[in-house]
Image (spheres, helix red, strand yellow):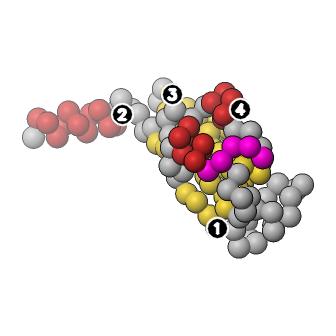
């Protein structure tokens, strides 16, 4: 019973930090290691690890404006969430657009703080 009370205290006081996704993911890591037209899927796996999701494009996904839907074969998604303090949640999302040759066509990084 004492262990249960301690565990509940930790959870409700915010001492447990909900960090999810690839915790090594940073904007500088992305910018230093992803080169459009050059970086391969294996390079991504070596640098960033396995993506959270891989989508095979069916024409329904949003893609960068300067490409046609025929250009994009897969979309790899990575993310990281981290909590700072009691109420601040940070999120970093990375969508990587892969071409038919298995190379990065383009990528989009989105950061938010709540």
The span from disc 4 to disc 2 (Cα, nearest Å) is 31 Å
Q: Where does the image place residue 48, in percent across and percent down from the top left?
A: 55, 40
Marks 1,4: beta carbons within 8 A = no
Q: Callout 4 environment at 10 Å: few (<14), some (14 to 19), or many (20+)?
A: few
Where does label 3 land, which residue?
A: 84
Q: Callout 1 environment at 10 Å: few (<14), some (14 to 19), or many (20+)?
A: few
Residue 103 in view in this figure: yes
Where does label 4 land, which residue?
A: 31
**Sooner in the amino-acid sequence: mark 3 or mark 4:** 4
Where does label 1 land, which residue?
A: 56
The answer to whether 67 appears left or right of 5 in the picture is right
Start-end of magenta stretch: 37-41
The span from disc 1 to disc 3 (Cα, nearest Å) is 34 Å
Where does label 2 land, which residue?
A: 16
**Sooner in the amino-acid sequence: mark 4 or mark 2:** 2
Residue positioned 51% across, 28% down in the render: 84
The span from disc 2 to disc 3 (Cα, nearest Å) is 11 Å
């Amino acid at each position: 019973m004492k262990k249960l009370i301690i565990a509940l205290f930790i959870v409700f006081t915010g001492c447990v930090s909900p960090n999810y996704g690839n915790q090594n993911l940073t904007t500088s890591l992305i910018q230093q290691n992803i080169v459009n037209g050059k970086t391969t899927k294996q390079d991504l796996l070596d640098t960033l690890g396995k993506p959270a999701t891989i989508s095979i494009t069916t024409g329904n996904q949003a893609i960068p404006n300067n490409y046609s839907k025929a250009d994009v074969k897969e979309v790899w998604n990575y993310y990281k969430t981290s909590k700072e303090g009691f109420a601040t949640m940070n999120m970093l999302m990375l969508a990587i657009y892969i071409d038919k040759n298995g190379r990065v066509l383009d990528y989009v990084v989105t950061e938010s703080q709540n």
